[in-house]
Image (cartoon, rainbow, N blue to C red):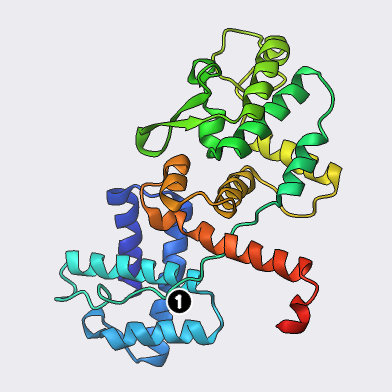
Amino acid sequence: MKYLKNEYGYYLTREKGLANNTINAYLRDLEQYINHLTKYRNIKYPNTIKKADVQAFLKALKQKNLTAKSISRKLSSIKGFHQFLLLEREVETDVASLIEAPKQEKSLPDVLTVEEVFKLISSLKDDDPLTLRNIALLELIYGSGLRVSELLNLKVFDIHLVANYVKIIGKGNKERIVPLGQMSVVAIREYLAKGRPHLVKVENNYLFLNQYGNKLSRQGFYKILKKMGNDVGITKDISPHTLRHSFATHLLEAGVDLRTLQELLGHEDISTTQIYTHISKKHLQEAYLKAHPRAKESK
């Protein structure tokens, strides 16, 4: 069995071309799996493995309090190994193929309250180029709910301030039109007039530039947000995704329907958008418990 595990490692390298870290992770999972089969199921040859043996290993992982996410990853490693065994004719059937991964609880992303967003933006009062850029960044990502990659890949000619919209190239190279709010228009206009010209060092069409005149990176924007949050005393872990999630949640709470929100966010499947209904309900409940004078007594 361990010989076949090593052969599988060569297969992943030669045939699949996977990265060393990925291959090593798969092989660690398989080492654990094979040791379990040998020690607790008395299995030495792959053609004697049954579906129940795989399920017993997964049950043992659960008893060790591994998360559903970790168990799913190990099951993925096992399934790949059994597919390889079938391909190499070491087994006649793939006993792992129909085993389903455990359901994972979807963790709700952090969102800011409307007050926290306003606090973040209103803290930026200077009119130097970098501050004007930061205001435009915040107004645009919160005002239009863009993905961070969409935001930072914007070109100057993608912005249409007179018509109040921005052209986005999203996932799968799909184009969509997203409306611009008035505050976004004002902030971008100010940045284009008084901020960006001072940041340009060489010919560059990207809308948002760093202090060296290059396209602002994802890491750079993340650091900017972290500092802003710390400066105004927001203890939540703020990231570009936090502002996109906040945009979606606040629109739902204001009455925007799911289909419209799906279009704005660029989701292919509406089930992806539906997570925001859970966030919205959570926010409404928290607001109720905080504000209603008899909420705690009536629980």
Instruction: Report the side of 273 relative to 226 (left or right).
Output: left
> Which residue is drawn at the image coordinates 31% and 62% (left, top)?
8
Could you say where residue 15 lies in the image, as x and y percent from the top left?
A: 27, 50
**In the rendered view, would you say 187 is above or below 111?**
above
**In the rendered view, would you say 134 is above or below 272?**
above
> Which residue is drawn at the image coordinates 62% and 66% (left, top)?
282
Q: Farthest residue toward the front? A: 293
Q: Which of 183 and 255 is in front in this view?
A: 255
Instruction: Report the side of 15 relative to 109 (left or right).
Output: left
Could you say where residue 20 lies in the image, as x and y percent from the top left?
A: 45, 51
Q: How many labels does the image show?
A: 1
Residue at disc 1, secondary structure? helix
- Quadrant of the drawing holding the N terminus: bottom left
- Quadrant of the drawing holding the C terminus: bottom right
> Which residue is drawn at the image coordinates 43% and 55% (left, top)?
272
Q: Which of 211 and 116 is in front in this view?
A: 116
Q: What residue type is labelled 1?
A: Gln
Instruction: Report the side of 178 relative to 90 (left or right).
Output: right
Q: Name the residue under label 1.
A: 32
Could you say where residue 175 lies in the image, as x and y percent from the top left?
A: 38, 30
Looking at the image, can residue 209 be seen? no
